[in-house]
Image (cartoon, helix red, strand yellow):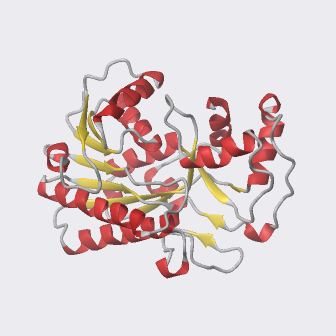
Amino acid sequence: MKKETVLVTGGSGFLGVHTVLQLLQWGYTVRTTVRSLTKKDSVLHALNEGGITNVSALSFYEADLTSDKGWKEAISGCDYVLHVASPFPASDPEDEMELIIPARDGALRVLKAALQAGVKRVVLTSSFAAVGYSPKPDGHLFTEEDWTSPGDVEQAYIKSKTLAEKAAWDFINNAGVGMELTVINPVGIFGPILGNISSASVDGVIKKILNGDSKESPAFTMGVVDVRDVADLHIKAMLAPKAAGERFIATADEIVSFYDVAQLIKQNRPGQSAAVADMEPIPKQFYNGISNQKAVTALQWHPRSTQEALLASVDSL
């Protein structure tokens, strides 16, 4: 067993449960927060499906991003905090503050509790939403230097991730003396489902294409990353001295449209593609690049291919 204790917030989520799984495989003592302890059984079922038979090193804490209750107990005695939990809605709420407040205030709540508990480093899961949604010229390659300006976007989720990450950096720069912050900015997270814990990307893209609900390819492309690789990047970022104070985009090498995903399924999983619609390809100007080179070179991170991540979702569905 390793000596360190790591808290993963949001252990009942898609990325949360994969992160807990890998930490247990590495031998850490792991804590996780869930909004309600009624979610504990679904997390244990998912971990069991992932091959974890001994959960003696795992403990659960009830804590919600909208309340102070439970955070001090969950974080006290931890060496690291991986703040993965964040609300991700099926659709944009009428009032954007329904998303912005729990994302921003929740991040600050976790950071304050971590600072008081003497945590060495917090790794915050932000999103490519905080990087790549302000207008850029065609052919622009997005890197960690890019930021979304909240004034450029209408979607509450994109605003919430941008404002939460900015608030986290402001807190660390102004008040977080002695504690380090690293931020991970994943694109759409795909890969294998454990238990019945899925992601908004798998449900909103793969499921809809497989069952024929997506009839045409919307005029946008997306980066793809495997959930196993995002969990791995969080752990690498937790441990690497040079990751302190940095943000890292988590993406595989290729970006895709719905059309590309549909073609991939038809060619590689013909038995599952009966309901997949015949879509028209979208114009090439939508294919702006996203660089993963910072994570690859600084942290020796080697993500699975876009195709492998997408097909893993198809197979587990």
Q: Where is residue 160 in the image (x, y as percent from the top left)?
A: 43, 67
Vertical side of 204 occupied by 174: above or below: below
Quadrant hosting residue 177: bottom left
Left or right for 226, reference 167 = right
> Looking at this view, is 97 or 186 the one in front?
97
In which image quadrant can residue 203 be found?
top right
User: Which residue is situated farthest in the front direction here?
Assistant: 94
> What is the quadrant of the N terminus in the image?
top left
Name which residue lies at 63% across and 79% down.
136
Q: Residue at image x 35%, y 56%?
A: 124
Q: Is residue 170 above or below residue 267?
A: below
Left or right placement of residue 273 versus residue 224 in this view: right
Left or right for 268, reference 131: right
Above or below for 189 versus 283: above
Toward which corner of the image does residue 266 lie, by quadrant? top right
Front one among 232 and 260: 260
Residue at x 47%, y 49% (from the top left corner): 300
Name the residue located 47 percent from the left edge and 25 percent from the top edge: 50
Q: Quadrant of the C terminus?
A: top right
In this orientation, which residue lies closer to the viewer: 205 or 281? Answer: 205
Which percent across, then down, holds residue 126? 43, 60
